[in-house]
Image (tube, rainbow, N blue to C red):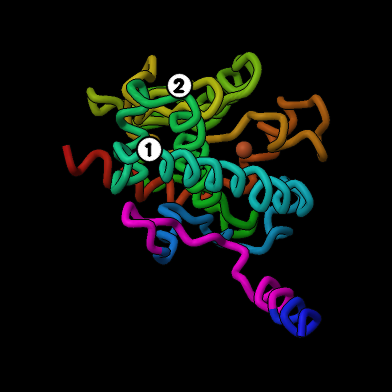
Amino acid sequence: MRIALALATACAALMTPAVVPAQSSAGQASTPAPAAFSLPALPYAADALEPAIDAQTMTIHHGKHHHAYVDALNKAVAADPALAGQSLEQLVAGAGALPAVVRNNAGGHWNHSFFWQSMIPPAQSGGPSPELAAAINAKFGSLDAFKVAFKAAGTGRFGSGWVWLIVGGDGQLAITSTPNQDNPLMDVAETKGTPILGNDVWEHAYYLQYQNRRADYLDGWWQVVNWKAVSDRFAAATTRR
Ligand SMILES: [Fe+2]
């Protein structure tokens, strides 16, 4: 009898879900709330950006690094009732008043989601729309000069961070850089604006393939910029003004 009871208990334990249901204030078990944020799928295969970015880098960058930001953000939000129901955009916009764990991981989630959509296989990279090309020429002199300035901002970022092309509050294009997982949408950003292109200059974005050669990564990355996406963002940012 005792053996039968022990077996039944063991079987019940094996069937218990891995996720422990949350307890309501009345002490009754309830269904766990779904995670607020989820990892978006890559819009292309992991090897689709080669030779600019190798498949192993993409797999780890997306599946491990970005995934970790999403998980940490969900954990932090679930632990703080004041953050319940806030969108990712709201969290990012108010990052300066939030705990560092929320600022860093909300930024990490937003930045990487934006980054994947900013790239495309080399054969489909294309070029800026006539309107964006005109704005780049007016601001930087030429597309090549813009690339030189963007690369300088990327190599000049000490430590980890991002380099951005934004539409500023004055409607003009500008290149800016942010540390860690900050971005120009944050209230704490030194230069604020609407990002239309961004590159990740954390070592995890390039080290497996380029080792310490960040400048080479920044050069190679132009092969996979999704200029259609960048042009569409430029149009949206300038027409809603
Ligand atoms: Fe990254």
Q: What residue occupies the far front of the structure in this picture?
A: 1
Would residue 214 be found to the left or right of residue 237 on screen?
right
The residue beneath circle 2 is: 176
Q: Are marks 1 and 2 in contact (CB under 8 Å)?
A: no
Q: Does residue 231 sit above or below 1 in this rendering?
A: above
Q: Position of residue 137 (x, y in %)?
A: 40, 29
What amino acid type is highlighted by mark number 1? Answer: Asp
Please give the name of the residue rendered at 38% of the width and 19% of the height, measured from the top-left corner: 189
SS at mark 2 in the image: strand
Please give the name of the residue rendered at 82% of the width and 40% of the height, measured from the top-left corner: 209
Q: Nearer the viewer, residue 233 or 114?
A: 114
Quarter, ligand 1? top right
* Mark 2 Cβ and ligand 1 under 8 Å apart: no
Q: Does the magenta stretch include residue 91?
A: no
Please give the name of the residue rendered at 38% of the width and 30% of the height, measured from the top-left corner: 166
SS at mark 1 in the image: loop
Please give the name of the residue rendered at 67% of the width and 71% of the height, measured from the top-left corner: 13
Q: Where is residue 28 in the image (x, y as percent from the top left)?
A: 38, 63
Q: Position of residue 71 (x, y in %)?
A: 55, 47
Figure quadrant of the C terminus: top left
Which quadrant of the figure has residue 42? Answer: bottom right
Figure quadrant of the N terminus: bottom right
Q: Mark 1 to mark 2: distance in Å?
A: 32 Å
Q: Nearer the viewer, residue 157 or 30?
A: 30
Give the label, 1 or 2, closer to the camera.
1
The residue beneath circle 1 is: 80
Count residues near mark 2 (Cα–Cα under 10 Å), then give few for <14, some for 14-19, many for 20+: many
Residue range (magenta): 9-28
Q: Nearer the viewer, residue 93 or 225?
A: 93
